[in-house]
Amino acid sequence: MDMQGFTSGELVAQLMRLLPEVEPYFEKAAERHDLRVSQVIHWEQVNTHPGTLLSEVLVYPLFKPLMKSPEIDAEAEDFLARCFEFIEGLEEDPDGWLVDTAHFTFLEFFLESREVLDRAFRFAWPKTRAATLSMLRGWNVPVDPSWEDPPRRPPAPLRSPRTPCPLRDAAPWLPVASAPVAGHAATLVKCR
């Protein structure tokens, strides 16, 4: 599965799409500039560097505590999986400008402990995995062979984490199709 990279101009939209949990922190950053979150379309409106903004609204309040936590539940796993999808988007920036942001804002933090590295490799996408391995080798940090092989990733969800699906939420055992099935369209619901 490939993550579509995004540019500096798309960072705010991608952040809010993938990680809506940042909204209360983003709200505080926007308020400092007399803006509402809905008015912020580019990170430059609320901060001097994308890494500074991401540190304020994502890394320090949400990401680092979960990465350091001794145990995480299914909800935290889902959140971290989306964080690493976002990090991969930074790594895949077609202009290359956000790659340094990914490195200094996220990857260097992985050096904090073996436990953080283990968790990072559990969720890392291909570019993030390769960049992290390269960073470790550059700093002569021993690489655990298990970090070389990516875990099998489940298929992507049919809907974003923010969009409710009444049928799936009420009856998760019922099939939900991404396209109508001939003769059975009335029994299946498409959730986005």
Image (cartoon, rainbow, N blue to C red):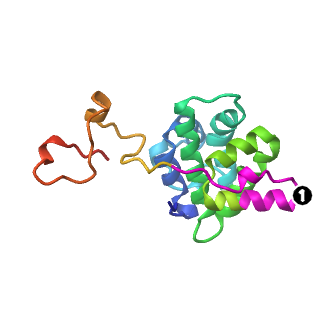
Q: Which residue is the extreme one toward the right?
A: 140
Residue under the image location 23 percent in, 54 percent down: 179
Query: Where does the image place residue 101, in percent across and percent down from the top left?
Result: 69, 57
Q: Which residue is the extreme one toward the bottom?
A: 95
Q: Relative to 130, does residue 84 appear above or below in the rendering?
A: above
Closer-to-camera residue (51/27) = 51
Residue under the image location 54 percent in, 46 percent down: 82
Query: Which amino acid, by three-letter code, is at mark 1?
Result: Asn
Query: Where does the image place residue 6, in percent across and percent down from the top left?
Result: 53, 63
Q: Residues within 10 Å of mark 1 (few under 14, many from 20)?
A: few
Closer-to-camera residue (142/88) = 142
Q: Is residue 152 left or right of residue 50?
A: left
Query: Where does the image place residue 164, in percent across and percent down from the top left?
Result: 33, 36
Residue under the image location 41 percent in, 47 percent down: 157
Q: Is residue 64 left or right of residue 19?
A: right
On whether residue 132 falls in the magenta region, the answer is yes
On whether residue 41 falls in the magenta region, the answer is no
Residue under the image location 61 percent in, 53 percent down: 87
Q: In this picture, which residue range is highlighted in magenta?
A: 131-153
Q: Relative to 191, does residue 8 appear above or below in the rendering?
A: below
Closer-to-camera residue (137/38) = 137
Q: Which residue was labeled with disc 1?
A: 140
Q: Is residue 148 left or right of residue 62?
A: right
Q: Which residue is the extreme one toward the left?
A: 183
Query: Where does the image place residue 86, in percent across and percent down from the top left?
Result: 57, 52
Say how many tags the image has: 1
SS type, badge 1: loop
Closer-to-camera residue (74/98) = 74
Q: Is residue 169 left or right of residue 109?
A: left
